[in-house]
Image (spheres, rainbow, N blue to C red):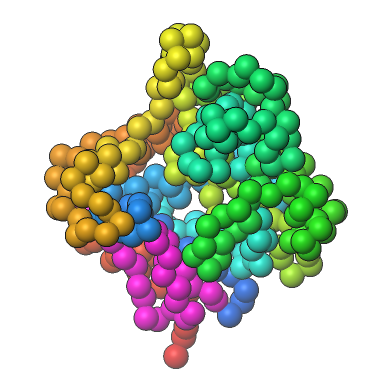
Amino acid sequence: MRILSEAHFPELPNYYRGKVRENYDMPDGSRIIISTDRLSAFDRIITCIPYKGQVLTQTARYWFEATKDICPNHVIEYPDPNVVVGKRLDILPVEVVVRGYLAGTTSTSILTLYKKGEREMYGIRLPDGMRDNQVLPHPIITPTSKAFDGGHDEPLTAAEIVERGLLTAEQWQTLSAYALALFARGQEMALKQGLILVDTKYEFGTDETGAIILADEIHTPDSSRYWLADSYESSFQKGERPTSFDKDFIRTWVVERCDPYKDELPEIPLELIEQTSKVYIKAFEAITAQTFVPDDSGETPVARIRANLERYFPRS
């Protein structure tokens, strides 16, 4: 298997290693972002999934190009299937999740809060009597504080965002309008592919002029929940979760065998890794209606990326 576990090039300046991405801040104000195949869960790296980095980069590319008329994004160019060169931005301290359905499993998801009896959340009131995975009266934004220091995200209302000085009223108005328009475009295009875009996360930053720019990724299988449209109605009527791109085989397998936050992780079976890789590829093809073509050029993925980034290396 051709795995991109890391992509550290000493020739490039200002290296920062994220959980999944390698980053380099260039002198010209751009940032080189390399998506590796690392799979992050339980606040640690648990394995690598072949072609995951290419799938995520190319899925985001599909959506960045399909939404650039709605909102400016950070993309400058793609020198390699795993690499995007983007504008370096000041990331805004608010994470934006847009939701179209009463769904989710995390502590901050609206379904979790709703089941606890809460009806007022994120500054929005939901009606009584809603069922799991029911479509909302209209898509809503559920913002949280962005925990840069590794802390926990905190649910916010629009008023709190402005009152705390996290964003100005004008910034919030612009950002929320962008987010809802991007989500509407995403739902419309996904439905043509037989998919429901259930909810998704957006990250925005500001450039040197103060303009709000879409950053990171958009509508990828890692940042979004998709359901198969033809499974929705029957599943909903039965009270079951609609069929989705289930990438959680490995997380589930690990949890069944240890406490992943405390214990040493068991070795992940090869067949489980291969199965997850196939799901990522299937998701790319279903979302984009394109055939996934793995780039197996170069002796290794790192060698290929090095060759494609060589023009960015400083000249001595």
Is residue 278 among the parts visible in the rendering?
yes
Judge whether 100 appears above or below 2 on screen. Answer: above
Q: Which residue sits at x=27%, y=53%?
A: 260
Q: Quadrant of the C terminus?
A: bottom left
Q: Quadrant of residue 68?
A: top right
Q: Quadrant of residue 19?
A: bottom left
Q: Is residue 198 left or right of residue 38?
A: right
Q: Which residue sits at x=41%, y=53%?
A: 81
Q: Which residue sits at x=17%, y=49%?
A: 268
Of residues 239 and 129, the one nearer the viewer is 129
Judge whether 259 appears above or below 291 on screen. Answer: below
Instruction: Indicate the position of residue 281 as horizontal and vertical percent values.
Output: 34, 37
Of residues 307 and 209, the one nearer the viewer is 209
Q: Is residue 208 left or right of residue 110?
A: right
Instruction: Indicate the position of residue 201 as horizontal and vertical percent values.
Output: 57, 44
Magenta segment's dominant SS is: loop
Instruction: Give the farthest residue toward the right.
Output: 170
Q: What is the count of numbered marks?
A: 0
Q: Is residue 32 left or right of residue 173?
A: left
Is residue 291 among the parts visible in the rendering?
no
Instruction: Give the farthest residue toward the bottom.
Output: 316
Which span of residues is magenta-colored?
A: 1-26
Instruction: Indicate the position of residue 67 as horizontal and vertical percent values.
Output: 65, 41
Judge whether 163 appears above or below 197 on screen. Answer: below
Q: Which residue sits at x=57%, y=36%?
A: 113
Instruction: Indicate the position of residue 299 as horizontal and vertical percent values.
Output: 21, 61
Residue 23 belongs to the span the image colors magenta: yes
Judge whether 55 appears above or below 261 on screen. Answer: above
Residue 206 belongs to the span the image colors magenta: no
Of residues 13 and 198, the one nearer the viewer is 198
Q: Is residue 187 left or right of residue 54?
A: right
